[in-house]
Amino acid sequence: MIRQLVCLVGVFWLFTAVSAQDIAPFAEGSVDNMSPYVGEPVTYTLRIYTPEAIENSMVTEPSFFGFGRSDTTFEPTTSTETVDGQVYSVITQRYLLYPIRSGDMTIDPFTIDVPETPFGAGFSISTNALTVDVQAFPEPVPETFINAVGQFTISASATPTQLTYGGAFTLTVAVTGSGNIERLLAPLVTLPEGWQLFAGDTSLTEQGLGVGSKTFTWTVIANGSGNVVIPAVVLSSFNPQTGTFETQETRPITLNITGNAESDAPVVRTLVPLPTVFVPELRTETTAIETSPLPITPPIWFWGLWFVPPLFVGGMWLIRRPRTEKQASAPQSPARNKRAKNIQQLKACLQALQDNAPKDAYADILVILLDFIGTKTGSPVTLENLEGVLSDYPAGLRAEVMACAEEASAAQYAPVTREDVRHLSQRVLRVCVAIEKARAS
Protein backbone atom coordinates (compact mmCIF):
# COMPACT_ATOMS: atom_id res chain seq x y z
CA MET A 1 0.00 0.00 0.00
CA ILE A 2 1.49 3.29 -1.13
CA ARG A 3 0.25 6.61 0.16
CA GLN A 4 1.56 10.11 -0.14
CA LEU A 5 2.18 12.34 2.81
CA VAL A 6 2.18 16.09 2.22
CA CYS A 7 4.27 17.95 4.82
CA LEU A 8 3.23 21.59 4.99
CA VAL A 9 5.73 23.80 6.74
CA GLY A 10 5.81 27.63 6.83
CA VAL A 11 8.38 29.01 4.40
CA PHE A 12 11.34 30.72 5.95
CA TRP A 13 15.02 30.74 4.95
CA LEU A 14 17.78 29.79 7.33
CA PHE A 15 20.59 30.69 4.96
CA THR A 16 21.11 32.53 1.72
CA ALA A 17 20.77 30.55 -1.51
CA VAL A 18 24.55 30.35 -1.89
CA SER A 19 25.24 28.94 1.57
CA ALA A 20 22.27 26.55 1.36
CA GLN A 21 23.79 24.82 -1.65
CA ASP A 22 26.74 23.69 0.48
CA ILE A 23 24.52 21.69 2.88
CA ALA A 24 23.38 18.32 1.55
CA PRO A 25 19.85 17.26 2.55
CA PHE A 26 19.28 13.70 3.81
CA ALA A 27 16.64 11.50 5.46
CA GLU A 28 16.76 8.64 7.92
CA GLY A 29 14.34 6.07 9.34
CA SER A 30 14.44 4.27 12.67
CA VAL A 31 12.29 1.96 14.79
CA ASP A 32 12.13 1.94 18.57
CA ASN A 33 12.37 -1.88 18.81
CA MET A 34 14.46 -3.93 16.38
CA SER A 35 13.35 -7.34 17.78
CA PRO A 36 9.65 -7.16 18.67
CA TYR A 37 7.28 -10.10 19.04
CA VAL A 38 4.48 -10.79 16.60
CA GLY A 39 1.70 -8.27 17.28
CA GLU A 40 3.85 -6.04 19.49
CA PRO A 41 3.50 -2.40 18.39
CA VAL A 42 6.63 -0.67 17.10
CA THR A 43 7.07 2.98 16.17
CA TYR A 44 8.79 3.88 12.91
CA THR A 45 10.16 7.44 12.85
CA LEU A 46 10.92 9.24 9.60
CA ARG A 47 13.18 12.33 9.85
CA ILE A 48 13.89 14.61 6.88
CA TYR A 49 16.87 17.00 7.14
CA THR A 50 17.00 19.99 4.76
CA PRO A 51 19.06 23.20 4.85
CA GLU A 52 15.86 25.24 4.72
CA ALA A 53 12.24 24.77 5.59
CA ILE A 54 10.29 23.33 2.66
CA GLU A 55 6.70 23.22 1.56
CA ASN A 56 4.74 20.65 -0.45
CA SER A 57 7.41 17.98 -0.20
CA MET A 58 6.15 14.63 -1.53
CA VAL A 59 6.81 11.57 0.66
CA THR A 60 6.29 8.17 -1.00
CA GLU A 61 5.80 5.42 1.57
CA PRO A 62 6.91 1.78 1.20
CA SER A 63 4.38 -1.06 1.30
CA PHE A 64 5.21 -2.05 4.92
CA PHE A 65 4.93 -5.67 3.76
CA GLY A 66 4.72 -7.98 6.79
CA PHE A 67 3.35 -5.25 9.05
CA GLY A 68 -0.12 -4.06 9.94
CA ARG A 69 -0.53 -0.31 10.18
CA SER A 70 -2.39 1.63 12.84
CA ASP A 71 -5.51 3.56 11.88
CA THR A 72 -4.22 6.42 14.03
CA THR A 73 -2.61 9.22 12.04
CA PHE A 74 0.07 11.54 13.40
CA GLU A 75 0.67 15.10 12.31
CA PRO A 76 4.24 15.88 11.21
CA THR A 77 6.30 18.14 13.46
CA THR A 78 9.09 20.59 12.56
CA SER A 79 12.21 21.64 14.43
CA THR A 80 15.81 22.70 13.91
CA GLU A 81 18.84 20.55 14.69
CA THR A 82 22.59 20.94 14.37
CA VAL A 83 24.42 18.04 12.68
CA ASP A 84 28.22 18.20 12.19
CA GLY A 85 28.14 21.92 12.79
CA GLN A 86 25.40 22.55 10.19
CA VAL A 87 21.90 23.73 11.12
CA TYR A 88 19.07 21.77 9.50
CA SER A 89 15.32 22.16 9.37
CA VAL A 90 13.92 18.78 10.43
CA ILE A 91 10.50 17.30 9.60
CA THR A 92 9.53 14.31 11.79
CA GLN A 93 6.74 11.86 11.00
CA ARG A 94 5.82 8.79 13.07
CA TYR A 95 4.05 5.54 12.10
CA LEU A 96 2.67 2.88 14.47
CA LEU A 97 3.18 -0.63 13.03
CA TYR A 98 2.25 -4.17 14.11
CA PRO A 99 4.42 -7.12 12.92
CA ILE A 100 2.08 -9.82 11.64
CA ARG A 101 4.50 -12.72 11.25
CA SER A 102 7.86 -13.79 12.61
CA GLY A 103 11.22 -13.67 10.84
CA ASP A 104 13.34 -10.93 9.30
CA MET A 105 10.94 -8.24 8.08
CA THR A 106 12.43 -5.48 5.90
CA ILE A 107 10.96 -1.98 5.79
CA ASP A 108 11.86 -0.58 2.39
CA PRO A 109 13.17 3.00 2.02
CA PHE A 110 10.97 6.08 1.93
CA THR A 111 11.46 8.44 -1.01
CA ILE A 112 11.17 12.20 -0.52
CA ASP A 113 10.80 14.45 -3.55
CA VAL A 114 11.40 18.15 -2.83
CA PRO A 115 10.05 20.51 -5.51
CA GLU A 116 12.06 23.20 -7.23
CA THR A 117 12.10 26.64 -5.58
CA PRO A 118 13.11 30.08 -6.89
CA PHE A 119 16.37 29.67 -4.96
CA GLY A 120 17.31 26.11 -5.91
CA ALA A 121 16.59 23.04 -8.01
CA GLY A 122 14.39 20.21 -6.78
CA PHE A 123 15.95 17.05 -5.42
CA SER A 124 15.06 13.53 -4.27
CA ILE A 125 16.39 11.72 -1.21
CA SER A 126 15.72 8.28 0.34
CA THR A 127 15.94 6.72 3.77
CA ASN A 128 17.85 3.61 4.68
CA ALA A 129 16.14 0.19 4.54
CA LEU A 130 15.57 -1.41 7.96
CA THR A 131 15.41 -5.12 8.80
CA VAL A 132 13.43 -5.98 11.93
CA ASP A 133 13.87 -9.39 13.61
CA VAL A 134 10.30 -10.33 14.58
CA GLN A 135 10.14 -13.05 17.24
CA ALA A 136 7.53 -15.83 17.33
CA PHE A 137 5.50 -16.66 20.44
CA PRO A 138 6.97 -19.36 22.66
CA GLU A 139 5.23 -22.72 22.79
CA PRO A 140 2.76 -23.78 24.03
CA VAL A 141 0.26 -21.05 23.16
CA PRO A 142 -2.80 -21.09 25.50
CA GLU A 143 -6.13 -21.98 23.89
CA THR A 144 -7.66 -18.81 25.36
CA PHE A 145 -5.06 -16.59 23.66
CA ILE A 146 -6.47 -14.66 20.67
CA ASN A 147 -4.20 -11.72 19.84
CA ALA A 148 -3.56 -9.64 22.98
CA VAL A 149 0.13 -8.59 23.15
CA GLY A 150 1.17 -6.25 25.96
CA GLN A 151 0.39 -5.57 29.62
CA PHE A 152 -3.36 -5.47 30.26
CA THR A 153 -5.98 -5.62 33.01
CA ILE A 154 -9.58 -6.73 32.45
CA SER A 155 -12.89 -5.98 34.19
CA ALA A 156 -16.54 -6.81 33.56
CA SER A 157 -19.90 -5.41 34.68
CA ALA A 158 -23.62 -5.90 33.99
CA THR A 159 -26.42 -3.33 33.93
CA PRO A 160 -28.96 -3.86 35.42
CA THR A 161 -28.40 -6.77 37.79
CA GLN A 162 -32.07 -6.90 38.89
CA LEU A 163 -34.36 -8.07 36.07
CA THR A 164 -37.23 -10.40 35.17
CA TYR A 165 -37.19 -13.65 33.25
CA GLY A 166 -36.55 -12.98 29.54
CA GLY A 167 -35.32 -9.46 30.29
CA ALA A 168 -32.28 -7.87 28.64
CA PHE A 169 -29.17 -6.44 30.25
CA THR A 170 -25.90 -4.96 28.96
CA LEU A 171 -22.67 -6.86 29.58
CA THR A 172 -19.54 -4.68 29.42
CA VAL A 173 -15.92 -5.90 29.34
CA ALA A 174 -13.09 -3.34 29.50
CA VAL A 175 -9.43 -4.10 28.71
CA THR A 176 -6.93 -1.45 29.80
CA GLY A 177 -3.17 -1.23 29.40
CA SER A 178 -0.40 -0.86 26.84
CA GLY A 179 0.29 -2.93 23.75
CA ASN A 180 -1.76 -3.67 20.65
CA ILE A 181 -4.82 -2.14 22.35
CA GLU A 182 -6.07 -0.83 19.00
CA ARG A 183 -6.24 -4.31 17.44
CA LEU A 184 -7.54 -6.29 20.43
CA LEU A 185 -10.28 -8.79 19.63
CA ALA A 186 -13.14 -9.38 22.06
CA PRO A 187 -12.50 -12.06 24.69
CA LEU A 188 -14.75 -15.13 24.78
CA VAL A 189 -17.89 -14.72 26.93
CA THR A 190 -19.46 -17.81 28.53
CA LEU A 191 -23.17 -17.68 29.45
CA PRO A 192 -25.66 -20.18 30.92
CA GLU A 193 -27.29 -22.52 28.43
CA GLY A 194 -30.26 -21.02 26.60
CA TRP A 195 -29.21 -17.40 27.03
CA GLN A 196 -28.85 -15.18 23.99
CA LEU A 197 -25.88 -12.88 23.28
CA PHE A 198 -25.93 -10.03 20.75
CA ALA A 199 -22.77 -8.05 19.91
CA GLY A 200 -22.91 -4.32 20.61
CA ASP A 201 -20.55 -1.40 20.18
CA THR A 202 -16.77 -1.47 20.66
CA SER A 203 -15.07 1.75 21.76
CA LEU A 204 -11.40 2.68 22.01
CA THR A 205 -9.94 5.41 24.23
CA GLU A 206 -6.26 6.12 23.53
CA GLN A 207 -3.99 7.94 25.95
CA GLY A 208 -0.84 7.66 23.85
CA LEU A 209 0.91 5.38 21.39
CA GLY A 210 -0.41 1.88 22.15
CA VAL A 211 -1.80 2.95 25.53
CA GLY A 212 -5.47 3.17 26.40
CA SER A 213 -8.65 1.22 27.05
CA LYS A 214 -10.91 -0.84 24.79
CA THR A 215 -14.49 -1.54 25.81
CA PHE A 216 -16.67 -4.33 24.40
CA THR A 217 -20.43 -4.43 25.01
CA TRP A 218 -23.08 -7.09 24.42
CA THR A 219 -26.84 -7.23 24.90
CA VAL A 220 -27.85 -10.42 26.73
CA ILE A 221 -31.31 -11.99 27.05
CA ALA A 222 -31.54 -13.71 30.45
CA ASN A 223 -33.56 -16.93 30.26
CA GLY A 224 -33.15 -17.97 33.88
CA SER A 225 -34.54 -17.33 37.33
CA GLY A 226 -33.22 -16.77 40.83
CA ASN A 227 -29.64 -15.78 41.59
CA VAL A 228 -27.67 -16.63 38.46
CA VAL A 229 -23.88 -16.25 38.22
CA ILE A 230 -22.21 -15.21 34.96
CA PRO A 231 -18.82 -16.97 34.81
CA ALA A 232 -15.62 -14.94 34.80
CA VAL A 233 -14.39 -13.60 31.45
CA VAL A 234 -10.86 -14.85 30.69
CA LEU A 235 -8.15 -12.83 28.89
CA SER A 236 -4.89 -14.50 27.91
CA SER A 237 -2.19 -12.10 26.73
CA PHE A 238 1.48 -12.27 25.84
CA ASN A 239 3.77 -9.95 27.80
CA PRO A 240 6.78 -8.97 25.64
CA GLN A 241 8.61 -7.62 28.72
CA THR A 242 8.73 -11.06 30.38
CA GLY A 243 8.38 -13.22 27.27
CA THR A 244 5.55 -15.21 28.88
CA PHE A 245 1.79 -15.64 28.56
CA GLU A 246 -0.39 -14.21 31.31
CA THR A 247 -4.02 -15.15 32.04
CA GLN A 248 -6.44 -12.90 33.93
CA GLU A 249 -10.08 -13.32 34.91
CA THR A 250 -12.82 -10.88 35.79
CA ARG A 251 -14.95 -11.29 38.89
CA PRO A 252 -18.09 -13.40 38.37
CA ILE A 253 -21.30 -11.34 38.08
CA THR A 254 -24.44 -12.30 40.04
CA LEU A 255 -27.86 -11.44 38.63
CA ASN A 256 -31.15 -11.53 40.52
CA ILE A 257 -33.86 -12.70 38.09
CA THR A 258 -37.51 -12.87 39.09
CA GLY A 259 -40.27 -14.87 37.37
CA ASN A 260 -39.94 -18.04 35.32
CA ALA A 261 -40.78 -19.49 31.94
CA GLU A 262 -44.25 -20.71 32.93
CA SER A 263 -46.65 -18.26 34.56
CA ASP A 264 -48.85 -19.70 37.36
CA ALA A 265 -51.50 -17.01 36.99
CA PRO A 266 -54.88 -18.44 35.81
CA VAL A 267 -56.22 -17.33 32.45
CA VAL A 268 -59.58 -15.55 32.87
CA ARG A 269 -61.97 -15.82 29.94
CA THR A 270 -65.02 -13.55 29.73
CA LEU A 271 -67.98 -14.30 27.50
CA VAL A 272 -69.00 -11.13 25.67
CA PRO A 273 -72.54 -11.23 24.17
CA LEU A 274 -72.70 -10.08 20.56
CA PRO A 275 -75.50 -7.84 19.27
CA THR A 276 -77.99 -9.20 16.76
CA VAL A 277 -76.55 -8.93 13.26
CA PHE A 278 -78.79 -8.72 10.19
CA VAL A 279 -77.95 -11.44 7.66
CA PRO A 280 -79.10 -10.68 4.08
CA GLU A 281 -80.87 -13.31 2.04
CA LEU A 282 -78.49 -15.35 -0.08
CA ARG A 283 -79.09 -16.36 -3.67
CA THR A 284 -79.65 -19.98 -4.44
CA GLU A 285 -77.14 -21.91 -6.51
CA THR A 286 -79.52 -22.21 -9.41
CA THR A 287 -80.14 -18.48 -9.59
CA ALA A 288 -76.41 -17.72 -9.57
CA ILE A 289 -75.78 -20.03 -12.50
CA GLU A 290 -78.60 -18.66 -14.58
CA THR A 291 -77.58 -15.01 -14.21
CA SER A 292 -73.80 -15.51 -14.56
CA PRO A 293 -72.36 -14.04 -17.79
CA LEU A 294 -69.46 -16.54 -17.77
CA PRO A 295 -69.76 -19.92 -19.50
CA ILE A 296 -69.72 -22.96 -17.26
CA THR A 297 -67.05 -24.70 -19.37
CA PRO A 298 -63.95 -22.56 -20.32
CA PRO A 299 -63.11 -22.37 -24.04
CA ILE A 300 -60.28 -24.37 -25.60
CA TRP A 301 -57.94 -21.36 -25.88
CA PHE A 302 -58.12 -20.98 -22.07
CA TRP A 303 -56.64 -24.45 -21.59
CA GLY A 304 -54.01 -23.72 -24.24
CA LEU A 305 -52.62 -20.88 -22.16
CA TRP A 306 -51.55 -23.43 -19.53
CA PHE A 307 -49.01 -24.89 -21.95
CA VAL A 308 -47.22 -21.57 -22.65
CA PRO A 309 -45.04 -21.39 -19.47
CA PRO A 310 -43.71 -25.00 -19.72
CA LEU A 311 -42.92 -24.51 -23.42
CA PHE A 312 -41.07 -21.25 -22.67
CA VAL A 313 -39.03 -22.80 -19.85
CA GLY A 314 -38.20 -25.83 -21.99
CA GLY A 315 -37.03 -23.63 -24.84
CA MET A 316 -34.77 -21.60 -22.56
CA TRP A 317 -33.30 -24.84 -21.16
CA LEU A 318 -32.47 -26.11 -24.64
CA ILE A 319 -30.76 -22.82 -25.49
CA ARG A 320 -28.65 -22.68 -22.30
CA ARG A 321 -27.82 -26.41 -22.11
CA PRO A 322 -24.65 -26.36 -24.28
CA ARG A 323 -23.23 -23.43 -22.29
CA THR A 324 -24.00 -25.11 -18.96
CA GLU A 325 -22.36 -28.37 -20.04
CA LYS A 326 -19.30 -26.46 -21.22
CA GLN A 327 -18.97 -24.68 -17.88
CA ALA A 328 -19.44 -27.95 -15.99
CA SER A 329 -16.71 -29.65 -18.02
CA ALA A 330 -14.22 -26.80 -17.56
CA PRO A 331 -11.40 -27.65 -15.10
CA GLN A 332 -11.72 -25.96 -11.72
CA SER A 333 -8.82 -24.26 -9.97
CA PRO A 334 -7.50 -26.44 -7.12
CA ALA A 335 -7.74 -23.44 -4.78
CA ARG A 336 -11.44 -22.99 -5.61
CA ASN A 337 -12.12 -26.57 -4.50
CA LYS A 338 -10.68 -25.86 -1.07
CA ARG A 339 -13.92 -24.97 0.71
CA ALA A 340 -13.99 -25.24 4.50
CA LYS A 341 -17.26 -25.20 6.40
CA ASN A 342 -15.75 -25.71 9.85
CA ILE A 343 -12.45 -25.31 11.68
CA GLN A 344 -11.36 -28.93 11.17
CA GLN A 345 -11.82 -28.65 7.40
CA LEU A 346 -10.05 -25.28 7.46
CA LYS A 347 -7.03 -26.83 9.20
CA ALA A 348 -6.95 -29.62 6.61
CA CYS A 349 -7.10 -27.14 3.70
CA LEU A 350 -4.31 -24.99 5.13
CA GLN A 351 -2.17 -28.06 5.86
CA ALA A 352 -2.63 -29.38 2.31
CA LEU A 353 -1.10 -26.30 0.68
CA GLN A 354 2.05 -26.08 2.79
CA ASP A 355 4.12 -27.82 0.09
CA ASN A 356 2.87 -25.58 -2.73
CA ALA A 357 4.98 -22.84 -4.24
CA PRO A 358 4.85 -19.89 -1.76
CA LYS A 359 3.12 -17.45 -4.12
CA ASP A 360 0.56 -20.10 -5.13
CA ALA A 361 0.04 -20.99 -1.47
CA TYR A 362 -0.63 -17.33 -0.59
CA ALA A 363 -3.24 -17.14 -3.37
CA ASP A 364 -4.86 -20.35 -2.09
CA ILE A 365 -4.91 -19.03 1.49
CA LEU A 366 -6.78 -15.93 0.32
CA VAL A 367 -9.36 -18.10 -1.50
CA ILE A 368 -9.78 -20.34 1.57
CA LEU A 369 -10.23 -17.32 3.87
CA LEU A 370 -12.84 -15.67 1.64
CA ASP A 371 -14.71 -18.96 1.12
CA PHE A 372 -14.77 -19.67 4.87
CA ILE A 373 -16.20 -16.21 5.61
CA GLY A 374 -18.72 -16.65 2.79
CA THR A 375 -19.83 -19.97 4.30
CA LYS A 376 -20.32 -18.37 7.72
CA THR A 377 -22.09 -15.23 6.50
CA GLY A 378 -24.12 -16.80 3.70
CA SER A 379 -22.93 -14.17 1.20
CA PRO A 380 -20.42 -14.34 -1.70
CA VAL A 381 -17.21 -12.68 -0.47
CA THR A 382 -14.53 -10.87 -2.49
CA LEU A 383 -11.74 -8.46 -1.53
CA GLU A 384 -13.97 -5.60 -2.63
CA ASN A 385 -16.94 -6.43 -0.36
CA LEU A 386 -15.06 -8.18 2.47
CA GLU A 387 -15.21 -5.28 4.92
CA GLY A 388 -18.91 -4.72 4.23
CA VAL A 389 -19.75 -8.41 4.75
CA LEU A 390 -18.05 -8.26 8.18
CA SER A 391 -19.86 -5.07 9.22
CA ASP A 392 -21.74 -6.89 12.02
CA TYR A 393 -18.52 -8.24 13.57
CA PRO A 394 -16.38 -6.34 16.15
CA ALA A 395 -14.08 -3.68 14.71
CA GLY A 396 -10.91 -5.43 15.96
CA LEU A 397 -11.91 -8.70 14.30
CA ARG A 398 -12.68 -6.89 11.03
CA ALA A 399 -9.24 -5.22 11.11
CA GLU A 400 -7.49 -8.56 11.69
CA VAL A 401 -9.36 -10.24 8.82
CA MET A 402 -8.56 -7.32 6.47
CA ALA A 403 -4.87 -7.46 7.48
CA CYS A 404 -4.73 -11.21 6.65
CA ALA A 405 -6.39 -10.60 3.29
CA GLU A 406 -4.06 -7.69 2.48
CA GLU A 407 -0.95 -9.73 3.25
CA ALA A 408 -2.18 -12.69 1.21
CA SER A 409 -2.97 -10.48 -1.80
CA ALA A 410 0.29 -8.49 -1.47
CA ALA A 411 2.41 -11.60 -2.07
CA GLN A 412 2.25 -11.00 -5.82
CA TYR A 413 4.31 -7.84 -5.29
CA ALA A 414 6.87 -9.13 -2.76
CA PRO A 415 8.95 -12.28 -2.26
CA VAL A 416 7.58 -14.87 0.18
CA THR A 417 8.99 -18.11 1.57
CA ARG A 418 7.56 -21.37 2.89
CA GLU A 419 8.08 -20.03 6.41
CA ASP A 420 5.91 -17.04 5.47
CA VAL A 421 3.23 -19.46 4.27
CA ARG A 422 3.31 -21.29 7.60
CA HIS A 423 2.97 -18.10 9.64
CA LEU A 424 0.16 -16.69 7.48
CA SER A 425 -1.68 -20.03 7.72
CA GLN A 426 -1.46 -19.93 11.51
CA ARG A 427 -2.72 -16.34 11.57
CA VAL A 428 -5.66 -17.12 9.27
CA LEU A 429 -6.53 -20.13 11.43
CA ARG A 430 -6.58 -17.95 14.57
CA VAL A 431 -8.78 -15.30 13.00
CA CYS A 432 -11.22 -17.93 11.65
CA VAL A 433 -11.44 -19.46 15.14
CA ALA A 434 -12.32 -15.98 16.41
CA ILE A 435 -15.03 -15.70 13.74
CA GLU A 436 -16.42 -19.09 14.80
CA LYS A 437 -16.48 -18.00 18.44
CA ALA A 438 -18.14 -14.68 17.58
CA ARG A 439 -20.89 -16.50 15.67
CA ALA A 440 -21.36 -19.05 18.47
CA SER A 441 -21.75 -16.29 21.04
Image (tube, grey):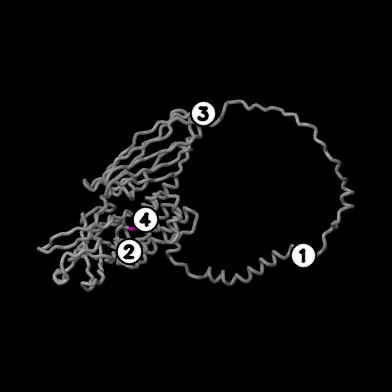
The earlier-in-sequence mark between 1 and 4 is 1
- Residue 120, above or below 191: below
- Looking at the rendered structure, the kind of residue marked 1 is Gly
Q: Quick one: label 3, few (<14), some, or many (20+) residues within 10 Å?
A: some
Q: Is residue 72 visible?
A: yes
102 within the magenta span: no
Q: Position of residue 274 (x, y in %)?
A: 76, 31
Viewer-nearest of discs 1 and 2: 2
Q: CA distance from mark 3 to mark 4?
A: 45 Å
Q: Badge 2, how many Cα within 10 Å: few under 14, some, many 20+?
A: few
Mark 2 in CB contact with mark 4 (< 8 angstroms): no
Secondary element type, mark 4: helix
User: Splitting the image into 4 quarters, where does residue 197 fall?
Assistant: top left
Give the amino acid type for the residue marked by disc 2 in the picture: Arg
The range drawn in magenta is 424-428
Label 3 sits on a secondary structure element that is loop
Between discs 3 and 1, the one toward the N terminus: 3
Which mark lies nearer to you, 2 or 4?
2
Residue drawn at 45 percent across, 39 percent down: 220
Q: Circle 3 is placed at which residue position?
A: 259
- Where does the N terminus fall, quadrant-wise? bottom left
Corner quadrant of residue 16: bottom left
User: Which residue is denoted by mark 4 in the rendering?
Assistant: 428
First reached walking from the N terminus: tag 3 or tag 4: 3
Is label 1 in a helix, a strand or a loop? helix
> To which residue does mark 1 refer?
304
What is the crowding at mark 1: few (fewer than 14 residues within 10 Å), some, or many (at least 20)? few
Q: Earlier in the sequence, mark 1 or mark 2?
A: 2
- Spatial CA distance of label 2 from label 3 is 59 Å
- Point out residue 243 in the picture as x, y percentages from the top left corner: 22, 47
- Badge nearest the viewer, 3 or 4: 3
